[in-house]
Amino acid sequence: MDSELMIILEQLERDKGIDKETLISAVEAAVASAAKKIWTVDKEVDVKVTLDRKTGKIKAWAGDEEIHSSEFGRIAAQTAKQVVIQKIREAEKDVVFGEYNARIGQIISGSVYRFERGNIIVDLGKSEALIPKSEQSNKEEFRQGERIRAYVLEVRRENRGPQIILSRAHPNFVKRLFELEVPEIYEGIIEVKGIARDAGERTKIAVYSKDEKIDCVGACVGMRGSRVKNIVTELHGEKIDIVRHSDDIKEYIQAALSPAEISQMQLIAEEKRVNIIVDEDQLSLAIGKYGQNVRLASKLVGWELDIYSAKQWEEKQKTAEGGAPAAEIPAVDSTPSDEDSKEEEEQE
């Protein structure tokens, strides 16, 4: 047992990355605790245990008296075995924690293992992960055994082992999908400037090209819409609006509200608020179903967007005290670019 114990400890240090001195200290402490319970009547007497680093022999003292008993070898062996097993489990938990903690913000894949109170348990091979109900799209359904990809949101340390939290509803899940599908984004030629998402329904993603020769929207859409279609398929039909980012806030807002056309726009810079006037037939398109289009556009550009029809704006001007006349609000060129038109056609 003596030399065998040292061989085991040295092998654990190599294979599991557990420091041998940490293991030796743990074995000594555990054996001392076991010995004190069995051989000392006086609980105040200190029991000391040492493990010889060369021979692996374990010795124990109760105060100044060395413990000699036929039972000690068996107790020491059992205790040492339990400590080694415990340390192996702890080390394996640490390895899993370190591996997945380093992958926070990335997409990983696994298979659906089971369903638990609306949560999805995913088998990752080395460990299990959890997709909480709050991090799922309400439009998606999965079957047991089905392959699934998700965004690593968080890794928590728990007594039973690392708790890996995944998400398919997080906006960055869509961002990472674009990085996987669009080489220009992965290489840094095209930059994702912003993203706003209503999981399962619609996502608006703003992109910008650092190379004037590369069209950011066209690159994200792909040949005949192939790239964006792959992402839509992964998201089970969620609509994707690819928006061209601009430093000109008016152009950016116009693109963000696409496909609606804006007639006039009034910026209130100090409040980061915009009054937007559209034709009557564009009002419902600009607002979107349950206000979705304007809500996502507002989140994307970081400004509060107030949408009015020409008639609504006129009535507002009549009731407002000291309001600026509608005639002072400049018209906006809302003619979509060829690339934007192409994007809408591809997604339809």
Image (cartoon, rainbow, N blue to C red):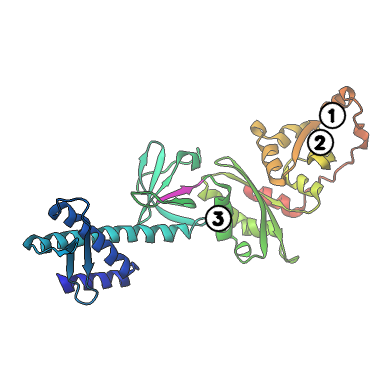
Main secondary-structure element of the magenta-colored stretch? strand
Q: Kindly tell me whether residue 197 is visible in this rendering.
A: yes
Q: Position of residue 211 (x, y in %)?
A: 73, 66
Q: Residue furthest left?
A: 70
Q: What secondary structure is marked by label 2?
A: strand
Please say if 252 is above or below 23.
above
- Judging by the rendered image, the residue that carries numbered circle 3 is 177
Disc 3 marks a residue whose amino acid type is Leu
Please report whichever mark, 3 or 1, sits nearer to the chain's N-terminal start: 3
How many other residues sit within 10 Å of disc 3, few (<14), some (14-19) or many (≥20)? many
Foreground residue among 256 and 96 = 96
Please report whichever mark, 2 or 1, sits nearer to the chain's N-terminal start: 2
Residue range of the region highlighted in magenta in the rendering: 163-168
Q: Residue at x 81, y 45 (%)?
A: 334
Q: Position of residue 135 (x, y in %)?
A: 49, 42
Residue 313 is labelled as: 1
